[in-house]
Image: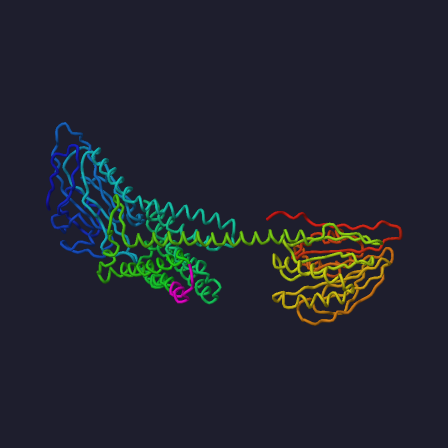
Amino acid sequence: MTTITLPGLGAADAAVGGTWQFHTGDDIAWASPTLDDSGWQPISATESWGAQTKFPNHFRYVGFGWYRRHIKIPPVAGVPSDLAIYLPRVDDAYEVYWNGALVGSFGALPPHPVYYFGPPPHTFGLGAARSGVLAIRVWKGPLNSFDTGEDGGLSAPPRIGPAAAIAATKAAYDYTWIRNRQFFFGLHLLYFLVAALAFMAWTNDRSQKVLFWMALFAISPVCRMFLTGFRTPLPYVWGLGLEQPFFALPDVSLWFLLLYLFKLESNRRLFQWTRILAWIALVASTLDCIDCILAVTFVRPSQIVDAILTTIVTPLPLYALVLVGYIFTRRRRLDLSRWLVAAFALSFDLFNALTIALAQGRRYTHWTIDATLTQPFWRFRGNPLNVNTVLVTGLFLSIVYAVYRFVAEHMERQNAVEREFLSAQELQRVLIPEDLPTLPGYAITSSYIPAQQVGGDFFQLIPLADGAALVMIGDVSGKGLKAAMTVSLIIGTTRTLAEFLTEPAELLAGLNRRLHGRLSGGFVTCLMLRVEADGACQMASAGHLPPVMNGREIPLPPALPLGIAPSVEFEPVDLKLDAGDWLTLYTDGLLEARDAHGELFGFDRVVAAAAVHATASATVEASGEFQPDDDITVMTIARIAAGAEASSSYHAPTLVEA
């Protein structure tokens, strides 16, 4: 047993170094100042009990351990007599006794232990200056897979001195702690900002899955910081347990980011394997979370489960190497930002897998390579920088840049699509005959309802020199600018052919020959009518829906749509319209409109609506709650009484600029 003398405790404090007395086990009587501890083991307070080699080795020891030190403090005249003690990090929970009296504690000891991840230094008052015995009762919690076995107890000598001096020492430590983590906190603030921006952008456009995975990747380290890296108030088992899913989430997020950034999501087998491994990682980390929380209560079973889960989870991050390897083997021409992601992902995963494996095996191999690899190689204003810091920062920044480029490219494509729609919309304004010509003896109405900004339906009314007129209605497969261009080709070609061909069947045959081979695999349905002033009509159909006359569908001979075969004959059909009769022509958009339950409007409803409504807009309005999935075009041609004024009308929604 040795006594340390701390003379002249005036404005400064002093370290209680040297050799302490140490005993494993637990007995509250060991706090007594009269206890004879001469038979206890000598130990140093400069490092934890598991790391010491000079004194009796307590490697991998868990449970109770007592430290005792006899201290002589001569009084100093004119100096405040109130003393305090500063305890650096103590692993894990502890109580401090001064001359047998409990003066402070951190955490709670068994039978209901509570301890914390990375416990900070604490200060406790010792009362008036006097000599005595300092006893520290420590409890070290069960080992987990990352425990090296070298922890436990004091990590540095306590300091004793006037309360003001101890407060200054604690303040200096807190300042240094914050200063040395400026880079750490700054990086995590950037993580949070990126996560927030990515999540908000994703909520505005759910199709951008890369933004969703970017948000998860960035928010994970922020959550880990608050759980275990920011002097969390959560007990160790809860902090470490809740942290487990956030160990797996960055790996899973990185996998999906690689898939979407490198456009590999279309590879069904690769995508399926990624999903399977993601579920394995998340389920295993969730089970690990539960295991950590129950670790103190069921120590041995928990360690067995921890070993099994560690065996499953540890190799999973290497899957990113598989994805990166696949990316490199494809040798696609990609921009620098994505290659940076691949390079940093490869480097980070290799380094991370190596250091984790070495750290988890250190308790058994006694190798310290992981500590060497993670040592700072440079300090900037106290902020340590090591290989891991550089790699994780590089990976994060490269992903942010790549996602930015990815989203920018997507926005450019979206703008191109919008410009295309605007161009198609302008073209459509030219093609849709807003001012229909009148036809003596007839009242003609039309209604056009596009399902999108630009549709593929079309109709025309072309007066002929002999007083008759051609009426055409049809539907081009597809949407957008391509469909609009096809419509312009059809209308231009039809108007040209109508100068020397006036029979519907001949017109369709000529139009078909000119469209064949020019529709890129598409087709056009079309119904062509020649309407005479006396009510005589002739029609021909190219695969279009038959018209309805006075509520009765007119059967038409079957025929191929335009553009499929080069030589097709179309059969004409004659009919007669008397005063009061009307024809209803329509496209399949009306037929295929659906209600909230998915039921089609159907042929029967179309015929019923056409039977009671002699105008196109009224026929369309009869569909009521049935919403179109495709464009709707309806035309009605009504024979009016002799002497009545001919009319024509057009109804369509106002086109809005894209």
**Residue that lies at the very extreme toward the top in this rendered image:** 78
The location of residue 369, given as percent across then percent down, is 23, 59
Q: Nearer the viewer, residue 123 or 429?
A: 429
Judge whether residue 325 is colored magenta. yes
Taking the spot 58% from the left edge, 54% from the top edge, the residue there is: 420
Residue 158 sits in quarter: top left
Residue 134 higher or lower than 409, as above or below: above
Left or right: where 383 falls relative to 558:
left
Which residue lies at the image location 17% right of the left edge and 54% below the top edge? 52
Q: Main secondary structure of the magenta part?
A: helix
Q: Nearer the viewer, residue 634 or 421?
A: 421
Which residue reaches farthest right? 642
Magenta extent: 322-334
**In the foreground, 533 or 106:** 533
Up/down of 314 relative to 222, above or below: below
* Colouring: rainbow
Please tell me which residue is depicted at 19% across the width and 50% down the height of the picture. Answer: 47
Q: Where does the image place residue 455, in percent across and percent down from the top left?
A: 65, 56
Q: Is residue 128 magenta?
A: no
Please tell me in which quadrant of the rendered image residue 491 appears: bottom right
x and y, in percent, of residue 658 in the image? 59, 49
Residue 576 in the image: x percent, y percent? 85, 62
Figure label count: 0
